[in-house]
């Protein structure tokens, strides 16, 4: 080792004498080496250079045939080293070059083996690393190690043969003894440089644990080389050539087979990696879509417990995620809805189809909200069964809007009572129930306010609306829970009494309603005494439609008005007959007016002082062709109710004015006569009254003061 230290010192002196060259080399190749690592590397490279020079000098001194064989052996080692067999899924490779390095040692001595070991190390470093430091240190370590171990081999072999061992045994034993030292001298210097560079101490335990397999390969290579050497000495060098050829073929076949399997494995690994990457991307996409979805999403395990929720659900329910995980989803639903939901879930778990439904959820602070929920299955990789996924969308605003629209559609805007549509639907349901079960009796009251038009006309529509609201409140406060009070329109109300077991109790309730409505009230500072007429009918009459029920209750109400108002009248079948009779009489009256069946009688009017005839009052009379005389009280009231009063008034005015005109022309004192004609209150609201009277007076040339209405 003394010459090597001197060579290293000399190299250091050369580097010191050329600072620029060394500085550039150090910056480029030794930038990550500290001082200790640099010194070790320089010693190792210097030893390798010196050993190589020595080996070349010794080989050059050999006879030409031997030197040629050594040269061919080194070339073959280089060729074999170029094609190592890579161990799949590791960073290591194995080859047979070491076999021929040991064979060269046994056949031609340490210089030949040192050159072959250096060449093999250079090929391996060139193939595995791009750094100049590694490409220099690795062959240097191999050359130096083989030179030292080769000299030891030669000494051991001579000693063993001198002790009487056969040459074959001596060769095998000597190669086996120097294999492990050669392994140590090759690897430890390189590991020492790496440890120094990283600022660590070299661990022999780690070295033995990590590279013991390589030591076994060196031992095996030495043994194979010994066998080849023994056969070559016995049968000639052709054995080595044949072994080299066979080794090349074996290496080629093994390399081809491993390469093919490795290519297939890499392709499979690539497919697996692609699938894993795609699965990871899909998982990321799902997680992103799940977490940031605009609608709420809940993953539920097969046991019904919440496994995962997204941000939309926590915002929807105003709950933290931790407060939801592990809970049963049914706990979040309002009572009643949870049982319906659980039945649907049970059907789905039992093999049914995914479903959608609208439910009420309980949010934070007892807040209730409506959600549209869709439930479907999903495969839970964490459990053996399928879980469920719920998608929730907040529809509270929509349900509120629908509720408001429903309220508007089925409630009166003035009184907030049910309107005619709502009342008809409930009444139709009651009729259907009674048709299937006669024991489910009901009653209907038809209520009409008395003299409401007087209040409306005298105090105004605002006062009339206030009276309607007050009557609605009184009716609602007086009925039983579950009874339906409705405003049908104008001043008409209706009450549906369901579960009526005692007709007398229903009549008593009607009387209480009448008394409640008739209580005085103050509107705009004026005391008003409202009144009502109530008609009532019961389901016992076998009604088939809601219209029939309302018709009969309405008839009973009109009967109450006809009997003097402020009373309750129970419908009976005779009312139909009276109504039919009234309708026939209305038709006869219409024809009587048009066909001139009516007549006028004139009640004379006298002045008392001076006593004289002053005029007449025209009175209408009707003698029915079949019924005989009809009372004016009957047919005039009928004309008012049926809308024929305007035609009757026009006919009376025309006949009376014409008769007065004749009398005024026929008598000497006729110019002093005038005519009185009774008209209906309905005539005063008829815009055609004044033009009609004016036209009649002008046509008969009668002074207006002669006609008193």
Image (cartoon, rainbow, N blue to C red):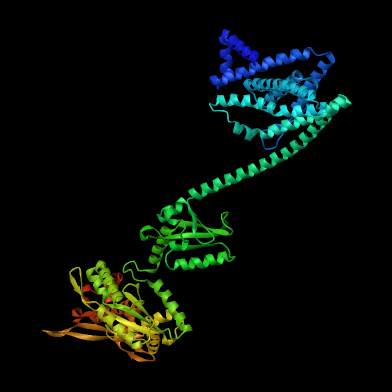
Q: Nearer the viewer, residue 218 or 245?
A: 218
Q: Quadrant of residue 455?
A: bottom left
Q: Position of residue 491 (x, y in %)?
A: 31, 74
The number of numbered badges drawn on the structure is: 0
Residue at 25% x, 81% y: name it. Answer: 515
Residue at 47% x, 83% y: name it. Answer: 435
Q: Position of residue 562 (x, y in %)?
A: 30, 85
Q: Quadrant of residue 87?
A: top right
Q: Quadrant of residue 244?
A: top right
Q: Residue reaching furthest left?
A: 609
Q: Residue reaching furthest front?
A: 163
Query: Against 223, is 576 above or below?
Result: below
Q: Is residue 521 left or right of residue 114?
A: left
Q: Residue reaching furthest top?
A: 17
Residue at 66% x, 25% y: name it. Answer: 185
The quarter of the image holding the N terminus is top right
Q: Is residue 153 left or right of residue 679?
A: right
Q: Nearer the viewer, residue 559 or 427?
A: 427
Residue 20 appears in view: yes
Q: Nearer the viewer, residue 598 or 272?
A: 272
Q: Is residue 49 left or right of residue 633?
A: right
Q: Is residue 280 left or right of residue 229?
A: left
Query: Against 261, is 498 above or below?
Result: below
Q: Position of residue 595 (x, y in %)?
A: 39, 82
Query: Against 256, is 522 above or below?
Result: below
The quarter of the image holding the C terminus is bottom left
Residue 596 appears in view: no
Q: Position of residue 229 (x, y in %)?
A: 82, 26
């Amino acid at each position: 080792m003394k010459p090597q230290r001197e060579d290293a010192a000399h190299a250091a002196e050369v580097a010191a004498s050329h600072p620029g060259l060394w500085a550039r080399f150090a910056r480029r190749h030794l930038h990550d080496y500290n001082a200790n690592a640099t010194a070790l590397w320089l010693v190792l490279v210097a030893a390798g250079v010196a050993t190589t020079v020595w080996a070349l000098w010794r080989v050059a001194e050999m006879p030409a045939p031997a030197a040629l064989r050594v040269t061919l052996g080194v070339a073959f080692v280089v060729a074999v080293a170029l094609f190592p067999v890579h161990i799949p899924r590791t960073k290591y490779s194995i080859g047979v070059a070491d076999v021929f390095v040991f064979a060269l040692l046994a056949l031609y001595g340490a210089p030949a083996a040192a050159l072959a070991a250096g060449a093999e190390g250079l090929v391996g470093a060139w193939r595995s690393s791009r750094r100049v430091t590694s490409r220099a240190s690795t062959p240097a370590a191999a050359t130096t190690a083989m030179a030292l171990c080769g000299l030891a081999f030669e000494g051991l072999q001579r000693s063993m043969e001198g002790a009487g061992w056969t040459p074959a045994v001596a060769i095998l034993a000597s190669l086996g003894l120097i294999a492990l030292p050669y392994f140590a001298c090759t690897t430890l210097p390189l590991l020492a440089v790496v440890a120094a560079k990283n600022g660590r101490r070299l661990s022999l335990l780690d070295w033995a644990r990590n590279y013991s397999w390589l030591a076994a390969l060196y031992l095996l290579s030495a043994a194979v080389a010994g066998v080849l050497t023994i056969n070559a000495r016995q049968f000639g060098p052709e054995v080595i050539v044949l072994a080299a050829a066979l080794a090349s073929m074996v290496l080629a076949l093994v390399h081809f087979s491993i390469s093919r399997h490795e290519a297939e494995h890499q392709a499979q690994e690539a497919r697996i990696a692609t699938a894993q990457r795609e699965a990871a991307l899909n998982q990321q996409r799902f997680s992103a879509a799940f977490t940031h979805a605009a609608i709420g999403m809940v993953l539920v395990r097969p046991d019904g417990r919440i496994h995962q929720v997204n941000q939309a659900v926590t915002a929807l329910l105003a709950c933290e995620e931790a407060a939801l995980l592990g809970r049963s989803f049914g706990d979040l639903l309002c009572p009643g809805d949870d049982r319906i939901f659980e039945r649907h879930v049970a059907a789905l778990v039992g093999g049914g189809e995914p479903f959608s439904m609208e439910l009420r959820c309980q949010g934070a602070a007892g807040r209730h909200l409506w959600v549209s929920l869709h439930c479907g299955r999903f495969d839970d990789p964490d459990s053996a069964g399928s879980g469920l996924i719920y998608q929730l969308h907040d529809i509270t605003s929509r349900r509120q809007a629908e509720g408001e629209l429903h309220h508007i559609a089925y409630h009166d805007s003035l009184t907030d009572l049910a309107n005619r549509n709502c009342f008809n639907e409930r009444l139709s349901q009651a009729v259907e129930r009674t048709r299937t079960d006669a024991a489910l009796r009901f009653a209907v009251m038809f209520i009409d306010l008395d003299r409401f038009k007087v209040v409306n006309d005298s105090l105004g529509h605002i006062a009339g609306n206030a009276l309607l609201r007050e009557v609605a409140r009184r009716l609602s406060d007086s009925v039983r829970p579950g009874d339906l009070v409705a405003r049908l329109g104008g001043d008409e109300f209706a009450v549906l009494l369901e579960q009526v077991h005692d007709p007398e109790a229903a009549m008593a309730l009607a009387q209480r309603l009448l008394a409640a409505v008739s209580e005085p009230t103050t509107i705009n500072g004026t005391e008003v005494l409202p009144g009502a007429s109530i008609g009532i009918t019961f389901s016992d009459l076998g009604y088939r439609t809601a219209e029939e029920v309302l018709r009969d209750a309405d008839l009973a109400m009109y009967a109450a008005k006809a009997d003097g108002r402020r009373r309750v009248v129970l419908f009976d079948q005779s009312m139909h007959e009276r109504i039919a009779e009234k309708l026939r009489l209305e038709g006869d009256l219409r024809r009587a007016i048009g066909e001139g069946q009516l007549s006028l009688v004139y009640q004379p009017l006298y002045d008392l002082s001076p006593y004289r005839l002053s005029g007449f009052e025209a009175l209408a009379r009707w003698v029915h062709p079949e019924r005989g005389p009809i009372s004016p009280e009957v047919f005039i009231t009928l004309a008012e109710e049926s809308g024929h009063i305007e035609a009757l008034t026009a006919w009376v005015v025309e006949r009376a004015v014409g008769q007065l005109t004749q009398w005024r022309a026929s008598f000497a004192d006729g110019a002093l006569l005038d005519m009185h004609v009774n008209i209906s209150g309905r005539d005063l609201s008829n815009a055609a009254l004044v033009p009609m009277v004016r036209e009649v007076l002008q046509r008969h040339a009668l002074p207006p003061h002669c006609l008193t209405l």
